[in-house]
Amino acid sequence: MGRFFSDPVEQALKYIYYDLRAGRGQEGFQLLQQAVQDGDADACCLLARCLYGPEYTWPGHNFPQDEQAGDALMRRSVLEGSAIGALLSLRCGVMDRQLAQSMPMTLQEAFDTVLDKAEHGEPLCQMIVGNAYYWGDFPEIQGKTREDFGSDDAVQSYLRENYAKCEDWLWKSMRSGNSGGVNLANFYREGKPGLIPPRPERAVEVYRYGAEQGDPAYLFYYANELYDQGKKGEAFGFYRNAAEAGEPRAFFWAGYSYELGDGVPKDNVQAAQYYQQALSAPIQEKVNPANRLGMFYYDGHGVERDYAKAFQLLKWAEDHGGPAMLYYLGACYANGQGTQQDYARAFTYLDRIDWNCHPAFYLLGKMYCNGLGVPTDIAKGVEYLQKAGDYVEVKEELSHYKKTLFGKWVRR
C-alpha cells in the first residue's frame, strides 16, 4: 500500500501528473483502469479526470475523451467513499443534491481527509485543497450561508481570507512536483474582483518556476510570456525545449519561429517538420499549422511542391474554422492546382483580398479581361494588371490590350 493511496494509484499519479517528461501517461491510464476494475474508489475519480479531456490533464498524454463515462466514474468514486472523489465531483459539476445525500461522508469530512494528506506532502491533494479555495467551493464545503454572517463586511472578510489561501496551497503543490499550477497563475493574473487585486507579474514567476523544473507545459507557457514581451529569441529556446519534451502545443510555435526567423535563423525545412508534428499531435488547434504547411506545399518552401497536398490542407483549415488563405485557395481554383479549375469559386476568394497582393491582382486582371468566372470587363482587368507588378506574365497579358483614341481599353 502506498503512503497516501494504493500503489497503482500512486504510480499512475506519477506518470499522469508528476513526471510528464517520462512520456508514460498511457501506462498511468492503464494502471487506473485496472485499479477501477479492482474496486479502487480513488482510481475511479482520477480515471474520470483523464476522460474529461485536456482541460483536466496534460494534452500530451492523448487520453480518450468520454465525458459521460467520466461522470459515471466520478459518481461511483463518491458513493464508494473517495474523499478526493467528493471534492473533485464538486469541482467538475457532478455533485448534486441526490449524490450529496447518498455519499458516506460530508463534504467537510472529505475536505479534512484530503487536507491531512496535503499537509503531509501529497501534491495532488495540495492542488485539490488549493482549488477548493481558488474556485470558491469552500462555503459549500463548510456549509456556510449569508445568515452565518452579521454584515456584508463580515462576508467580504470571510471570502477574502479563504480565497487567499489558494496561493500557498497551489505553490506547495507545484513545489511538490505537481504540474497543475495554471490556476495559481490565473489567480495572480486576475485576482478576485472586489476582494484581491491582480498581480500579473507573479503569474510569470509561476510559469518560470515550472519551466525551470523542465515541465513541458510550463516550458510552453513561459515561452508564450517571453514571446508576448518581444523576447522572441528566448521564447524560441523554450518553444523548442517544450516540443522536444513532447508538449504538443509547442510544435506550431517552434515551426512559426523557424518560418519567420523569430529568434532563430529562418529554416523552412525545420518549420515544415514542426508544422507536420503539430498536425499529428493530440490537440484540437490544427488550423494554423494546416494553413502554414499548405502554403509551404503550394510554394515549395521546405517541402517539395505538391498542389494536391496544398489544396487539401488549405481547404481543411478553412472548413474547420480557420482563416481562409484567400490568395492560395483562389489560385488553386483559378489554375486548377490540386482541385478542379473553377474561376467562379476562385473569384470568391480573390475578390476579398484587401492588401497589396501582386499575384492575386494578376489573376483578377486575367479573369476580368477574359471573362473567366466574371463578366468581361477589360478596363477593370487592365487596372488590376497594372497593379500586379513588373513581371513577365503580367507584361505578356497586358500586351493583348490597347487604348482606343477615345481612351477605351480593348483587345488588340
Image (cartoon, rainbow, N blue to C red):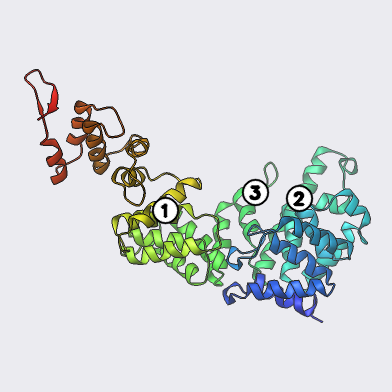
Q: Which mark is residue 136?
A: 2
Question: Between residues 81 and 321, which one lies in front from this camera angle?
Answer: 321
The crowding category of the residue bearing disc 3, from other C-alpha atoms within 10 Å (few below 14, some 14 to 19, many at least 20), is some
CA distance separating discs 1 and 2: 47 Å
Q: Amino acid at mark 2?
A: Gly
Placement of the C terminus among the 4 image quadrants: top left
Please state which of the two labelled residues, at mark 3 or mark 1, is closer to the viewer.
1
The crowding category of the residue bearing disc 1, from other C-alpha atoms within 10 Å (few below 14, some 14 to 19, many at least 20), is some
Would residue 193 be found to the left or right of residue 304 on screen? right
State the residue position of label 3. Answer: 191
Question: Between residues 283 and 379, which one lies in front from this camera angle?
Answer: 379
Q: Image point 83% across, 72% down: which residue?
A: 40
Question: Between residues 223 and 13, which one lies in front from this camera angle?
Answer: 13
Please state which of the two labelled residues, at mark 1 or mark 2, is closer to the viewer.
1
Q: Image point 44% across, 44% down: which residue?
A: 323
CA distance separating discs 3 and 1: 45 Å
Q: Amino acid at mark 1?
A: Gln
x and y percentages locating residue 155 in the rendered image: 81, 43
Mark before the other along the chain sequence, 2 or 3: 2
